[in-house]
Image (tube, rainbow, N blue to C red):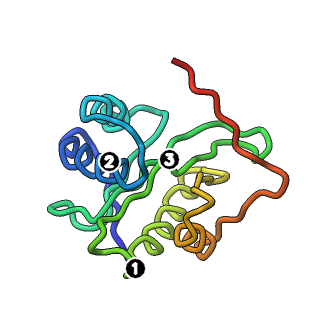
Amino acid sequence: MTTLHLADTSHLDILTHMVGAFHDEEGITSDEDHRRKALLPLLKGSPYGVIYLMGPLSSPLGYIAITFTWSLEFGGLDGTIDELYLRKKVRGRGIGTSAIYRLIKVLSQHGLKSLALEVDGRNQRALQFYHSTGFRLREHYNLMVMELV
């Protein structure tokens, strides 16, 4: 089973690098300063989310960033997988699946009522991966976003 380690400020540099790699793959525009500012509050213990490193701390295989909200519909604390990234060389080995199952167990033990994520509908590999771990599309629901600047 893939080990998960709660990330802290000592992991800022490696996470900044991995987030940059993920953003490059996904076509997300961000620079190092932006990534560091986004990561730091979570690494310092913000109640808004956590980041887990996957695999050995000496050389993490990837990360999972989870943010928290409150849901009346689901009756309490819920979470969103904001980002999940695995290094290219280790993909397809079951590490992500194992990490998702471990994450679900850990978060439910801490009272999380639901877990959601957003995935590019054109990314069939990601859709199949998340579907295989138990995530389902919510019929009649669409995520809508307004960026506040």
- Residue mark closest to the camera, 3 vs 1: 1
Tag of residue 92: 1
Nearer the N terminus, badge 3 or badge 2? 2
Percent of width and height locating residue 14 = 20, 49
Which kind of residue does numbered mark 3 sit on?
A: Asp
Answer above or below: position of 45 versus 25: above
> At x 63% / y 71%, what residue is drawn?
131
Sooner in the amino-acid sequence: mark 3 or mark 1: 3
Taking 109 as reference, is 92 left or right? left
Q: Of 46 and 67, which appears nearest the observer?
A: 67
Horizontal arrangement in the rendering, residue 70 relative to residue 49 (left or right): right
Mark 2: amino acid: Val
Discs 3/2, front? 2
Residue pictured at 44% horizontal, 74% vertical: 98
Crowding at dot 2, Cα within 10 Å, few <14 / some 14-19 / many 20+, comes out as many
Which residue carries the number 3 mark?
Answer: 82
Q: Which mark is residue 15?
A: none
What is the distance, in whole Å, between disc 3 and disc 2 at their CAs? 11 Å
Q: CA distance from mark 3 to mark 1?
A: 21 Å
Query: Quick one: which residue is furthest to the left in this view?
Result: 58
- The spot of residue 137 in percent (x, y) is 73, 61
Dot 1: element = loop
Q: Is residue 141 left or right of residue 90?
A: right
Counting residues from the start of the chain, the first of labels 1 and 2 encountered is: 2
The image quadrant of residue 1 is bottom left
Q: Is residue 38 above or below residue 140?
A: above
Marker disc for residue 19:
2
Quarter holding residue 89: bottom left
Q: What residue is rendered at 58% in x and 56% in y?
A: 119
